[in-house]
Amino acid sequence: MAKYRDTKAALIANGIFNGVLLITAVVMLFLNDFVEFNFTSLLFFLASLFFLSFIKTRSLMKEDLVGNSFVWMLMLVVGIIGAVAAVVFAVLSFFEGGFTADVVWAFLFAVGFEQLFKYMDEFVPSDYDFPAEFFKDYGFMIFFPICVLVVGLIGMVVNVAILVLLLINLLLCSAFSVMRRDELNLAAFITTLVTVAVNAFVLFVCLGFDVDRLYADGVYMFYVASMMFVALAVIICAAFHLLEMALGNVNETYSMIMYLVLPVVSFALQFLMFYHWKAALITVGAVIGIVILMTLMYKVTCTVFFTIFYGIKYIFTGEFIRDMLKSKPKSSATKKTGSKTPHVHDVQNAAIGAAQACYVEVVRVSGSAGNITVTLKNARDRHGNNHSAGRFMDELAKLLPGYDLSGIKVLF
């Protein structure tokens, strides 16, 4: 797909962003002599990110066929050096603690969000387009500043390391459930044992479990809940897993969503467990009952969920306002059929633009005037579902107003 998307813009934007990181490191180097805060590890960590970025820059250059094999190899070497340096100074930053360590956590969060959004199109319904390529090109430069700000603010209230442990626990609960579903029993139970051992060590050795402090210190209760909710999560997820085994035909995407949501629900229930354990047990039973009902009617559940989700998206992305302000002449001018007969070269240029809008790739445009075939790539997800090709003809019609497109056939 890369040949037809705007990789040059992504290359320039990433270059500017990583250049800003390097400039920030240089500025901090000069400030280091005038302020009490020690910037040393942080500035070297930011500088190493600049060199680490050469790996992504190399990928974009190869996609746009910029440079040659020697340049690509040189950039890979520089990127590997930057990666090694980033690890070294990240470890030093953890020992320094404070905001310096928070920046490293923010970097890890940003990378995690970037990877998540790059592959999010595997989890949304195939009828909807998700701009995975956008987050592949621009994800880190969006998430890193946001994560630095958010983690910095959170770090003023709680220990970010405990927050990270909470997120790891949430992911491990989901991983345990997924491995059990895939019959990886040994791996699932090893994961459970390691998770319990790490949480017990942190709770009793690092924090020091204190019942009196639990009810007197809200932050301490948050720390304890972050480690104790795992037991509830395993119970609720196990109930859902047994239901999956009984039904045998639960949608894979729905199953994955449930395994991500149920640990979060368990974390919320853990606070109720501290104060009213009887009410918490009743609530756990109610949650399991709701999960059973939703699963038995998962098609209806998915329809309601995605109707709400895309309804909110429709309003807050401005599409609702654009549709309200759209005039009638403009809406009638976007008909797919006109009087002019399109030629191959007309469709070739328009197809590239339409493919960029739909995040697919044009493989070839062949045929003759009035009888043209457009072959697309990456229009289906890994399950074989039509990913984004449904919009392709609409986008093509916008770029070819007045043309008769009835003779154009699209292959996926």
Image (spheres, grey):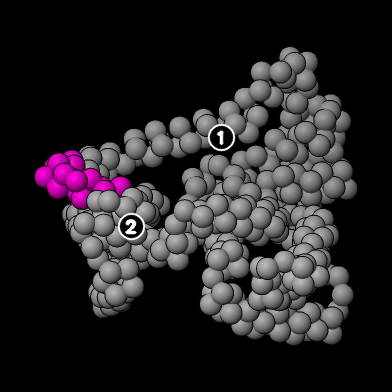
346 inside magenta stretch:
no
Identify the residue under disc 2.
220
Label 2: how many Cα within 10 Å (few below 14, some 14–19, many 20+): some
What crowding class fits label 1: few (fewer than 14 Cα within 10 Å), some (14-19), or many (20 or more)? few
Q: CA distance from mark 1 to mark 2?
A: 37 Å
Q: Give how far across and how far down residue 213 sits, in percent.
A: 26, 57
The residue nearer to you, when weighing 350 against 20, is 20
Residue 365: x %, y % from top left: 78, 52
Q: Quadrant of residue 14?
A: bottom right
Q: Main secondary structure of the magenta part?
A: helix
| Callout 2 amino acid | Tyr
Identify the residue position indicated by label 1 in the image: 313
Q: Is residue 409 above or below residue 58?
A: above
Please state if 410 lies on the left or on the right of 288 as rendered: right
Asked whether 7 or 48 is in front, the reply is 48
Q: Look at label 1 and name its amino acid.
A: Lys
Q: In the rendered view, tell whether residue 330 sits above or below residue 271.
A: above
Q: Residue at x 59, y 63 (%)?
A: 99
| Residue 268 coordinates in the image, percent (x, y) | 30, 47
| SS category of the residue bearing label 1 | helix
Of labels 1 and 2, the one closer to you = 2
Q: Nearer the viewer, residue 286 or 63?
A: 286
Picture coordinates of residue 224, whole percent (x, y)? 29, 60
Say which of 411 and 393 sits in front.
Answer: 393
Outermost residue on the top side: it is 328
First in sequence: mark 1 or mark 2? Answer: 2
Q: Which residues are magenta?
A: 265-286
